[in-house]
Amino acid sequence: MRNFKTIIVTGGAGFIGSNFIRHIFEKSGYAGNVVNLDKLTYAGNLMSVGDIEKQYGGKRYFFERADICDFDSVTAVLKKYDADCVVHFAAESHVDRSILGPAEFVRTNLNGTFTMLEAVRSMWKDRKDVLFHHISTDEVFGSLGDQGYFFEDTPYDPRSPYSASKAGSDHLVMAYYHTYGLPVTLSNCSNNYGPYHFPEKLIPLMILNLFEEKPLPVYGDGMNVRDWLFVADHASAIYRIITDGNIGDKYNVGGENERPNIEVVNLLCEVAADKMGRPKDYYKKLITYVKDRPGHDRRYAINCDKLKKELGWKQSVTFDQGLALTVEWYMNNKEWVESVRSGEYRKWIDTNYDAR
Ligand code: NAD
Ligand code: DAU
């Protein structure tokens, strides 16, 4: 088992990164330091790691505002903390935004990952007691028909600017392993859901619209299929991979929980009705079919047997449990929700940090 002294988590103020940092401190048994390196874009919110800052800030947890595209800043952070592991989450993550404005996706996901790789290569040189773990997506594999699964060796076939930029970043990571011998691992994960999810994505958007009895916009015929994984289970998978995964290997991470979007929305309506003391079908009248996403991938389905067999990982919650936990979290965390929806968290960031 690998044991690190200081892990740099890029994108640790985002949805999965913040949950991963929480997992490290509260569940993993890790005894070292964590540095959260984040540019704080619209998706980065320091409230998502407020509890960690309070408990571990300045002792074992540190925050550095930096852009992964800025070689000098990233190198300075690597040097300052003498980091021996990087877990690289930072990215532009929303497919719809990549359709509206692909440039930022190429810059952050492709150039940013390239810059991170160059920075660790120049810092670590030939060291083998270090690790660069890259977080990627199942979307790099393309779109499935009714049958079949994505395996680790499924050929790449990205179809949106987002997935193309992630695919390119995956190739760069593997190229640095093969060419320079940089110790890397890489994981391709399916759709995450859970606490601290930015409400532009399907599940949190639907939950918040439900609370306010606003329309629930379902793209196309609602029959596009995604595989849903509770975010805490993704976090535990990543920790298993960075400590025990084979260097140079890729691991698929999934929920083994495929659902058409309309089924997810119907389930959310039922969970919310139960929590709000409404009749079971009360919220379903809000479901509104809207224009489809251009190039909308039809189905994703992950085979994650390698991770389960080799590293003994498994999911800890069912979809029903995970959805109930998630709806409850959004009901009980109105301050976070309000700060995100009103943009208040951005004002706080802008007055506390110089915008780059
Ligand atoms: P997110 O959008 O919630 O968070 C992204 C974080 O990265 C934010 O804190 C943002 O401030 C930071 N960031 C963006 N650009 C940056 C830059 N140039 N420099 C430094 N920081 C920057 O994203 P997420 O949903 O938590 O996704 C995290 C990673 O996981 C991404 O690489 C994404 O591709 C991948 N992934 C996400 C999912 C999912 O379902 N959300 C599934 C599979 C893989
Ligand atoms: O598969 C992993 C990917 O999952 C990650 O790599 C991405 O970072 C993450 O954003 C997510 O991408 P999706 O496009 O699958 O997630 P999103 O929540 O945007 O959409 C999920 C499905 O719901 C998709 O089929 C589009 C549909 N949808 C989405 C929104 C926002 C709707 O029907 N209505 C909506 O309003």
Image (spheres, helix red, strand yellow):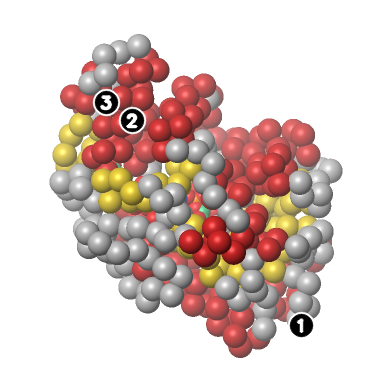
Q: Is residue 330 left or right of residue 352?
A: left
* Image location of residue 210, percent across then percent down: 32, 25
Q: Nearer the viewer, mark 2 or mark 3?
A: 2
Helix, strand or loop at disc 2? helix
Mark 2 Cα-neighbour bin, 10 Å: few <14, some 14–19, many ≥20: many
Q: Quadrant of the N terminus?
A: bottom right
Q: Is residue 325 above or below residue 256?
A: above
- Mark positioned earlier in the residue sequence (1 or 2): 1
Q: Which element is circle 1 on?
A: loop
Whether residue 267 is situated above or below residue 225 in the rendered picture: above
Report the front residue among 314 and 172. Answer: 314
For image coordinates 18% across by 34% down, the residue present is 288
- Residue name at image x 81 percent, y 59 percent: 5
Name the spot of residue 31 as percent of width and height, x first.
81, 49
Q: Where residue 111 is drawn, which disc sits there?
A: none
Residue under pointer 3: 214
Q: Residue furthest front?
A: 309
Residue type at tag 2 = Leu
Mark 1 or 2, which is nearer the eye?
2
Q: Residue at x 38, y 65 (%)?
A: 150
Cβ atoms under marks 1 and 2 closer than 8 Å: no
Whole-Å distance between the Cαs marked 1 and 2?
50 Å
Q: Residue 209, can we see it?
A: no
Q: Label 2 belongs to which residue?
A: 268
- Around disc 1, counting alpha carbons within 10 Å, would you say few (fewer than 14), some (14 to 19), or many (20 or more)? few
Q: Quadrant of the C terminus?
A: bottom right
Q: Nearer the viewer, residue 179 or 356?
A: 179
Q: Which residue in the protein does label 1 denote?
A: 126
Q: Is mark 3 within 8 Å of ligand 2?
A: no
